[in-house]
């Protein structure tokens, strides 16, 4: 199951409402199963589409507003008009070969990377900052701890990610569970307990606040905050 297509279809629908010209430039094709899942999630979580669009827009926003360079995007999912531009990234990566092919076709230097494998992270030559949105929600605690250790071993010094707050996934958690996918929601204290010695948080910002600075910031003005964006740095 390509979870990125669930979120991509929701983002496309949201863009059709708020920026139809941008949506028209993005020829996204998904099957009826994906469309049905998005419809079901939206029945349980009415603001799913703007929340997911906001999450996807985090990478470009932090690159531009926090001045991040030498960036590798992890778990990018299929590229959208809200993704960073190709010249803002050293690498666009994902575990899925289909995503990697789509990113390469869109002009990115794309690599297949499983973030749980240190040898994969070492393939991202010259990248020192990693950004991952919509990823840690799917990772159990030990995988997050291991990811920080892997980042260190692969010479990354900065990791930016978002995390949905405890209980804020709403009915989406039950629907994903029916597909065999566990969603792990976490508060700030939960995240703080997971970072290993040598790492600290330089910035923690509610996602809705951050997104007001995004390219489509006006459309995120009324966003209910359900997630935080973390910038972890290695001391
Ligand atoms: C929900 S999508 C998020 C896409 C995009 N980052 C966003 O915020 O809209 C999750 C993505 O994580 C990728 N993924 C899952 N496990 C991964 C892993 N171990 N390493 C790298 N990518 C992974 C999936 O292939 C998928 O593209």
Image: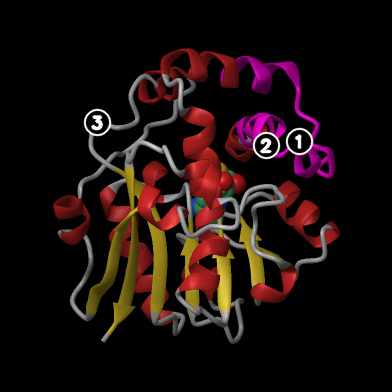
Residue ID at (46%, 80%): 154
Q: CA distance from mark 3 to mark 2?
A: 27 Å
Q: Nearer the viewer, residue 77 or 49?
A: 49
Callout 1: helix, strand or loop? helix
Callout 3: helix, strand or loop? loop
Q: Is residue 13 in the magenta section? A: yes
Question: How dense is the environment of label 3, judged by Cα within 10 Å: few (below 14), some, or many (20 and up)?
Answer: few
N-term mark: 3 or 2:
2
Per the image, the residue denoted by label 3 is: 167
Per the image, the residue denoted by label 1 is: 20
Q: Which of the 4 quarters of the picture holds residue 199? A: bottom left
Q: Is label 3's Cβ within 8 Å of ligand 1?
A: no
| Residue 23 screen position, x and y as percent | 76, 39
- Side (left or right) of 15 relative to 232: right
Q: Mark 2 and 1 residues: CB-CB less than 8 Å, in contact? A: yes
Quadrant, the C terminus: bottom left
């Amino acid at each position: 199951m390509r979870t990125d297509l669930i979120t991509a279809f929701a983002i496309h629908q949201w863009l059709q409402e708020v920026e139809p010209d941008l949506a028209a430039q993005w020829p996204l094709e998904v099957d009826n199963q994906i469309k049905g899942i998005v419809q079901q999630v939206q029945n349980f979580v009415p603001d799913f589409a703007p929340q997911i669009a906001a999450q996807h827009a985090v990478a470009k926003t932090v690159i531009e507003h926090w001045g991040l360079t030498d960036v590798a995007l992890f778990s990018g999912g299929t590229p959208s008009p809200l993704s960073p531009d190709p010249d803002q990234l050293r690498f666009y990566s994902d575990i899925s070969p289909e995503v990697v092919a789509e990113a390469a076709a869109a002009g990115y230097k794309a690599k297949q990377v499983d973030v749980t494998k240190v040898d994969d992270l070492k393939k991202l030559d010259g990248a020192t900052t990693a950004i991952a949105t919509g990823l840690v929600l799917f990772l159990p605690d030990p995988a997050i701890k291991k990811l920080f250790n892997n980042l260190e071993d692969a010479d990354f010094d900065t990791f930016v990610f978002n995390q949905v707050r405890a209980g804020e996934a709403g009915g989406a958690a039950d629907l994903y569970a029916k597909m065999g996918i566990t969603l792990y929601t976490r508060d700030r204290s939960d995240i703080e307990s997971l970072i290993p010695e040598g790492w600290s948080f330089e910035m923690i910002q509610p996602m809705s606040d951050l997104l007001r600075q995004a390219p489509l910031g006006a459309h995120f003005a009324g966003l209910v905050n359900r997630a935080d964006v973390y910038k972890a740095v290695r001391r």
